[in-house]
Amino acid sequence: MRKFFVSLMLAFTILFVNADLSFAREFDFEWQFACGDVFEAVNDSGTRYEISAPSSNAITVLSQNGGNLEVRFETIGDFYIVAHLPNGQKYFYHLMVGGQENHPIIEQRIEDGNENFAQEILTLVNRERNRLGIAPLHLSQDLMFSAAIRSKEIERRYSHTRPDGSDCFTVLKSIKHTAGENIAAGQETAQDVMNAWMNSQGHRANILNPAFNELGVGYHFKYGSKHGYYWVQIFRG
């Protein structure tokens, strides 16, 4: 199997208080639009949409009737839409809006194995915490949503700063009291990335921080990219 350069970043932790808003993710597509373009989604009747935009006036909902959604982008930036289908399925759209004219294209989809990796990493994290008598973490759906976004962002910019220049924690819909982020790149398995994090003082501190009680795990693979494999842990307490 092809090997990739392994890279780690210093763990990042912040103290904050904010409001709560939950999102869910099942499938992830990246679309690229120009400012002023219209996005149309049509699904089964009764589909419910949740929209996250860079600002309150960044998007105009032209129509939302049953399973139909039509919106216009008023500003550039990253937009996220979650479609809740009547059968329980959830679809997550990542819409990248730029300033130049282009046509919408599907770039890629998050691997279905992301949830399996999250469960595996959660088990490994709680094993380490249990050894020291620290309360276990549990997976949070909105943190999973945020970590999925960040795992794709660190392929573009490997940093705790997001590609748009903002702080990594701006991806969160809620920072209750404290939050932390671990990122890594190049490790092919959950065990490999956990070994790397546990052998790094800053990352280990986040994993064993008793102030945290929630975890989100993001995994992204892109063949031919600099590191191939990209991992994110987001902690919250």
Image (cartoon, rainbow, N blue to C red):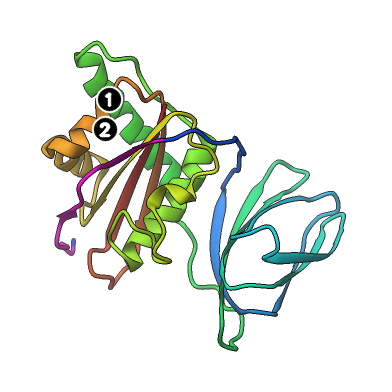
Q: Assess whether residue 203 is covered by the magenta stretch.
A: no
Q: Is residue 218 left or right of residue 158?
A: right
Q: Measured from the top left, where is residue 86 in percent x and y?
A: 78, 44
Task: Please name the amino acid that badge 2 sits on.
Answer: Asn
> Residue at coordinates 34% horizontally, 22% vertically from top-left?
211
Query: Residue 229 falls in which quadrant of the image?
Result: bottom left
Answer with the quarter of the image where residue 15 lies: top left
Q: Nearer the viewer, residue 5 or 33?
A: 33
Where residue 228 appears, as percent x and y from the top left, is 27, 63
Quarter of the image that includes the N terminus: bottom left
Disc 2 on helix, strand or loop? helix
Q: Are marks 1 and 2 in contact (CB under 8 Å)?
A: yes
Looking at the image, can residue 69 be seen? Answer: yes
Residue at far right of view: 65
Compared to residue 229, the image places residue 72 above or below, namely below
Q: Residues within 10 Å of mark 2 (few under 14, many from 20)?
A: many
Task: Identify the residue position indicated by label 1 in the image.
Answer: 209
Q: Magenta segment range?
A: 2-15
Q: Is the C terminus in the top left, top right, bottom left or bottom right quadrant? A: top left
Q: Is residue 40 above or below residue 204?
A: below
How far separated are the C-alphas under marks 1 and 2? 5 Å
Horizontal side, residue 175 vs residue 82: left or right: left
Q: Residue at x 35, y 19 (%)?
A: 136
Which amino acid does the dot numbered 1 rest on?
Asn
Q: Give the residue drawn at x 28%, y 71%.
A: 225
Residue 52 position, x and y percent, is: 63, 54
Residue 8 lies in the magenta-colored region: yes
Tag 2 residue: 206
